Amino acid sequence: MPCVMCRSTATFKSTVFRGTSPTTVKLCSTCADKVRAEERLRQIKETDGHEAKMAAVDEFLSSVGL
């Protein structure tokens, strides 16, 4: 499984939903740290309100180039 950013071996994998469409994000540990993937996922889960949650998902996907 290659990292979506640098094509190295991915060690981080998570699926987020943009509306009803799932997007799986695979990152190597270096890229996951660089985009603060764990922090962004926590923010998505803790965000209240559909619009705010979708904005957090869009921000995360944008940070990894998706």
Image (cartoon, rainbow, N blue to C red):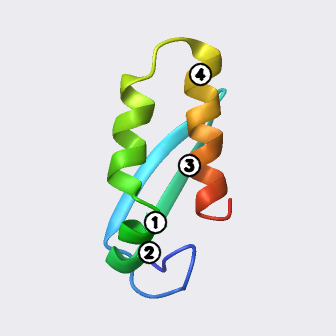
Which numbered disc, 2 or 3, marks the residue that appears first in the sequence? 2
Q: Position of residue 41 (x, y in %)?
A: 39, 42
Residue under numbered circle 1? 26
Q: Mark 4 is on which residue type?
A: Ala
Mark 2: amino acid: Cys
Mark earlier in primary sequence (1, 4)? 1
Image quarter hosting the N terminus: bottom left
User: Dot 4: what SS?
Assistant: helix
* Distance in Å between CA atoms under marks 1 and 2: 10 Å
> Total of numbered circles in the picture?
4
Residue 13 locus on image (x, y percent): 38, 60
> Mark 3 = which residue?
60
Residue in the foreground of this view, choosing between 7 and 30: 30
Tell me the amino acid under the disc marked 3: Phe
**Which callout, 3 or 1, points to the residue nearer the camera?**
3
Residue at x 46% of width, y 14% of height: 48
Residue 30 is left or right of residue 48, and the answer is left
Disc 2 designates what residue?
A: 31
Q: What number is the disc on residue 52?
A: 4
Residue type, label 1: Lys
